[in-house]
Image (cartoon, rainbow, N blue to C red):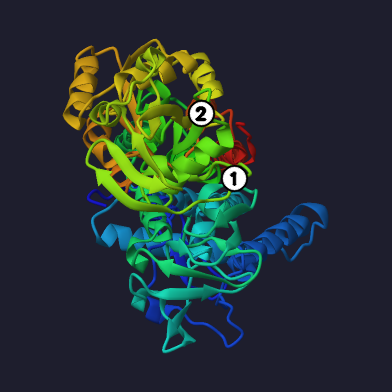
Amino acid sequence: MNEHIPHPHPPVYDENGNLICCSLEEKIDAKTPPQIAPRAEVHHAEDGHDHSHGHSHEGGLGWKAYLPALVSLILLLSGLAAEHLLNLEFFQGWVKVVWYTAAYLPVGFPVIKEAWEALRKGEVFTEFFLMSIATIGAFAIGEYPEGVAVMLFYAIGELFQTAAVQRAKNNIKALLDVRPNAASVLKGGKYETVDPETVQIGDTIQVRVGEKIPLDGSLLSEKAVLNTAALTGESKPQNVLTGEKVLAGSINLDGVVELSVDKLFNDSSIARILELVQNATARKSKTELLIRRLAKIYTPIVVYLAIAICIVPYFFVEDYLFTEWLYRALIFLVISCPCALVISIPLGYFGGLGAASKNGLLFKGATYLDQLTKVNTLVMDKTGTVTRGVFKIEDIVVAADYKEEAFMTLLMALEVKSTHPIAKAIMEYQGGQTLTEATDIQEIAGKGLKGNVAGKTVIAGNKKLMDQFGVNVPAETNSIVESIVMVGVDGQFAGYVTIADELKTDAKETIQQLQAAGIKQLMMLSGDKDSITQKVAKELNISAAKGGLLPEDKLNEVEQIKKDPSKIVAFVGDGINDAPVLAASDVGIAMGGLGSDVAIETADVVIQTDQPSKIVIGIKIGKSTQRIIWQNIALAFGVKVIVLILGAGGLATMWEAVFADVGVALLAILNAVRLQRMSWN
């Protein structure tokens, strides 16, 4: 942090007496997920489990953290009982002072200590200073129970606040929990357990049932069933087949599986996600920064006003009584502490970021959570964004002399050894045919394949290939916009297969929901053929679409849109070619599952599940977060202004002051915690 915000909170200790947070700035920054510890610092018992020290499994505060407040509460209640209920004669004079001082010190001493440390650094106007002066002043005028109560409830409020912060962390800390700690690598014909950071690309690793996959790789086993919930938010187990990608952090649910490592540990999906999340809360929203700046000005003004409340009436009030006006000034100080504002706002944003991560969305900062709610123009790529990026056979048309199965037997014989995506789509044809081996296969660059199958000369490819071999094709093929594979057998046209990219299941619904969510303009920009782009856009009811674009063309289109200052532009893409336009848009959104690393690094928001409908959920989470934050601002300002006026007029006591400070802070925290219980589906 480049700027120290002098509004600290009372320190909170864990059960081992270690200081958790000792200033407001540190408390806010404590919400940032902890940095990845060096592996040398991660200790494992022989049973293979991590053993925490000093914290509960959920990362909550230990019972010792509550002990000072509990002791103080018991002493305060017993003192009030002795003084007002039992009317004990000995409970007066020095006994009363000592008793309430003993009640005060467990919660007050840490605050006074931190106030002194802050003063030594030249930081006068801290909340430590405000609370110390207010409560010591209460003791000075003989209001011992109220002095104890103010500091006690303040400390209790901080404990609840810390618990709320840690609760908000849980969604994101789940990512840290899935960080794999060991990998079983094949070396010299047997498997050895090693640190995942030492595993190299191309190594074979083995994962048993219930274990986490330590690195990104390709499945070598026939199949695998994986739990990817911590990575994608998807609760349904994922079925993976041989050759398909698997992500580090997934949990193997069925059988022992083997995979080939594709990425080093530090480049794996889980490491990338952790880095994105860890950096997210460092990027403050404009609202949060504004409140922080206001708080820097607000606190000294309040201190000077409190001094004025105590001294100025001396010159205007006939029956001026110093202790009475000092009491009013102390009440004013207690009420004025800006903790409800300064902590509940970042807590609200952190709750929004946590809720987003739980729903498979990673925001790289609170500012993008805000910005997404303002977007009114959404530009999207086609392949991999609204389509699956996986080709499939759409239609098979054969000449009169052929049956479909016989036709596909000839075509598949040529395509069986090809690695082209279209060839893979053709090979997924499910018929009753038996594969026949082709001989003398030749690849004719930019046109297709030629070979001999069962004594026949077979060609398969585009129209240029058919023209080269003098095969006449039907005129109807000229109007087909999808990718087409034509087949000729012994110089005669045998038929064709159309191959198309499949729309994602939620694509159509997403477009409708985006329009309902306030997106006024939708546009599709694609590097694919314009005819295919227009067809997909029409299916999705997107009015503006352009195809055949290079990366710089996409960039130019978005820059043209941004020339209109009323348009806040978001771009959704997944490929390397989308990186420039992702960087140029107001909000760049990348598909994180199939998306390229470059696109994911450049984007402001990452959709881990590759579902475009998550954009709508992101907008809803952003709007809910903003709504709760502004509710908190209105609550804090409203109650404080009312009680400040009452306090200055002598109509409010310390008890109302405690409510205006700690009570409002707790209400704001509870309001912010609601984000973690909401559903946006």
Left or right: residue 519 compared with residue 104 = left
Q: Secondary structure at mark 1?
A: loop
Say which residue appears at 25% left-offset and 28% top-offset.
464
| Relative depth, front residue between 536 and 291 | 536
1 vs 2, front mark = 1
Say which residue appears at 39% left-offset and 38% top-offset.
366
Q: Amino acid at mark 2?
A: Glu
Left or right: residue 66 compared with residue 305 = right
Q: Amino acid at mark 1?
A: Gln
Q: Earlier in the sequence, mark 1 or mark 2?
A: 2
The vertical placement of 540 against 81, above or below, is: above
Say which residue appears at 43% left-offset and 20% top-offset.
536
Name the residue carrying label 2.
Answer: 394
On-image quarter of the C terminus: top right
Left or right: residue 174 compared with residue 294 = right
Q: Position of residue 443 (x, y in %)?
A: 27, 46
Count neighbours of disc 1 (C-alpha within 10 A) and say few if under 14, some if 14 to 19, many if 20 or more: some
Name the residue carrying label 1.
Answer: 433
Task: For residue 222, say whether it is visible.
Answer: yes
Task: For residue 302, say whether it is visible.
Answer: no
Q: Position of residue 449 (x, y in %)?
A: 32, 42
Whole-angstrom CA distance, mark 1 to mark 2, is: 19 Å
Residue 460 appears in which quarter of the rendering? top left
The vertical placement of 182 against 221, above or below, is: below
Q: Position of residue 88 (x, y in %)?
A: 79, 61
The vertical placement of 44 against 259, above or below, is: below
Count neighbours of disc 2 (C-alpha within 10 A) and say few if under 14, some if 14 to 19, many if 20 or more: some
Q: Position of residue 73 (x, y in %)?
A: 67, 59
Are the residues flagged by discs 1 and 2 in contact, CB closer than 8 Å? no
Q: Secondary structure at mark 2?
A: strand
